């Protein structure tokens, strides 16, 4: 199981939307053959809200932290397979805000999630982890459990602060990387809520490039009300295959699939998916031309 955490200290940058859109797109591109696990580490529980599928388990991620002997499978349930093919959910819990206090007396606090996920690492192809917008033990657990991380930043003057925070957090956890596992790979930074070009927008992008250099991805998620409309209708953002924001998230999903393949997580399975993805892109272009 290849685990990717979507992380940024700033709220409102689109972490949850990114997690949900990528999960939906992985399912669509693989036609449900990729079995994924969405891990909701945010106390707001927006990633595991009822629109993604009816929760049919009493246990949640909070119980995984509270009871080290709990089988993590008791907190996992299937998402709506029509909207999120192949996806399962580790149920979120508003009590996650209490995790810092819950783990206060434990000697090792940052690796609870890592150890819990090891029990199901051969049952899923990937996990995608949503995170809180604050520096908590829960956030540290999410980062320590991951193989890689990706950082969404909003298209504003303070955008780069969220990325720099993540880099500092990775450095703070140096003891974990030495004793437990390799440091997670930086898959890059991408802009969200991108508005039409202007002088200010161009300056923001130039400032970001100076800080993150080659880690700034060319993928930009446009600002759109389409996301809210889809949520109200109980649909994944990716249900409209030709909407600009859906196309952008599809490009991000394809980029991540390539990183999965390059990390030898799936071998021939990933390569086959890549070939099929190319065919789907051609079909999408034809569909868009027909609409015009």
Image (cartoon, helix red, strand yellow):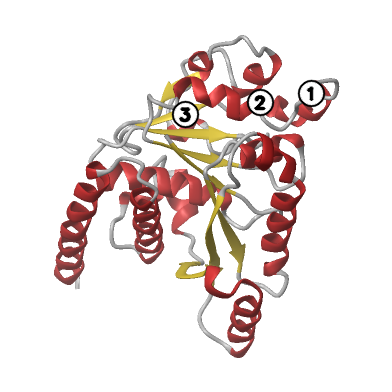
Residue 43: horizontal and vertical position, in percent?
Answer: 68, 34
- On the image, numbered disc 2 is attached to which residue? 112
> In the depicted view, which residue is nearer to us: 178 or 144?
178
Tell me if residue 35 comes above or below residue 133 in the rendering.
Answer: above
Q: Are marks 1 and 2 in contact (CB under 8 Å)?
A: yes
Lower position in the chain sequence, tag 1 or tag 2: 1
Q: How many marks?
A: 3
Residue 156 in the image, given as x and y percentages of width and height: 66, 72
Between disc 1 and disc 3, whose residue precedes?
Answer: 3
Mark 2 vs 3: CB contact within 8 A: no
Residue plotted at (79% across, 23% down): 103
**In front of the other: 148 or 203:** 148
Query: Distance of mark 1 from mark 2, alpha carbons?
Result: 9 Å
| Residue at figure coordinates x 44%, y 21% from the top left | 77
Left or right: 160 in relation to 250: right
Secondary structure under tag 1 reads loop
Q: Where does label 3 land, which residue?
A: 89
Q: Which mark is residue 103?
A: 1
Which image quarter: residue 246? bottom left
Per the model, the C-alpha gap separating discs 1 and 3 is: 23 Å
Q: Is residue 139 left or right of residue 199?
A: right
Reply above or below: 195 against 134: below
Q: Residue furthest front?
A: 178
Measured from the top left, where is residue 201 in percent x and y? 60, 82
**x and y percent of residue 232 in the render?**
47, 44
Q: Is residue 23 left or right of residue 64?
A: left
First in sequence, mark 2 or 3: give its number: 3
Residue placed most toward the observer, 249 or 127 = 127
Q: Residue at x 69, y 50 (%)?
A: 170
Q: Decide: few, some or many residues near mark 1? Use Cα within 10 Å; few <14, some 14-19, many ≥20.
A: some
> Does residue 15 appear anywhere in the picture?
yes
């Amino acid at each position: 199981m290849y685990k990717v955490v979507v992380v940024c200290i700033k709220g409102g940058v689109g972490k949850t939307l990114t997690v949900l859109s990528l999960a939906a797109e992985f399912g669509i591109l693989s036609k449900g053959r990729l079995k994924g696990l969405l891990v909701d580490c945010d106390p707001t529980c927006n990633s595991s809200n009822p629109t993604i599928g009816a929760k049919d388990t009493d246990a949640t991620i909070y119980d995984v932290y509270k009871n080290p002997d709990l089988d993590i499978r008791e907190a996992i349930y299937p998402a709506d397979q029509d909207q999120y093919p192949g996806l399962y959910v580790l149920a979120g819990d508003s009590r996650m805000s209490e995790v810092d206090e819950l783990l206060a007396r434990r000697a090792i606090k940052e690796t609870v999630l890592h150890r819990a996920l090891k029990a199901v690492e051969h049952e899923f192809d990937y996990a995608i982890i949503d995170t809180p917008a604050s520096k908590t033990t829960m956030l540290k657990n999410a980062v320590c459990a991951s193989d890689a991380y990706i950082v969404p930043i909003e298209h504003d003057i303070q955008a780069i602060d969220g990325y720099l925070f993540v880099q500092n957090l990775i450095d703070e956890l140096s003891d974990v990387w030495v004793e437990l596992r390799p440091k997670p790979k930086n898959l890059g930074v991408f802009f969200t809520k991108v508005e039409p070009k202007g002088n200010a927008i161009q300056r923001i992008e130039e400032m970001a490039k100076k800080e993150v250099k080659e880690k700034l991805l060319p993928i930009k998620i446009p600002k759109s009300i389409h996301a809210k409309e889809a949520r109200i209708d109980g649909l994944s953002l990716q249900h409209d295959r030709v909407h600009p924001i859906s196309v952008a998230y599809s490009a991000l999903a394809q980029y991540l699939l390539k990183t999965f393949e390059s990390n030898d997580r799936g071998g021939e399975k990933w390569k086959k998916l890549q070939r099929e993805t190319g065919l789907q892109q051609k079909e999408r272009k034809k569909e868009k031309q027909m609409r015009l």
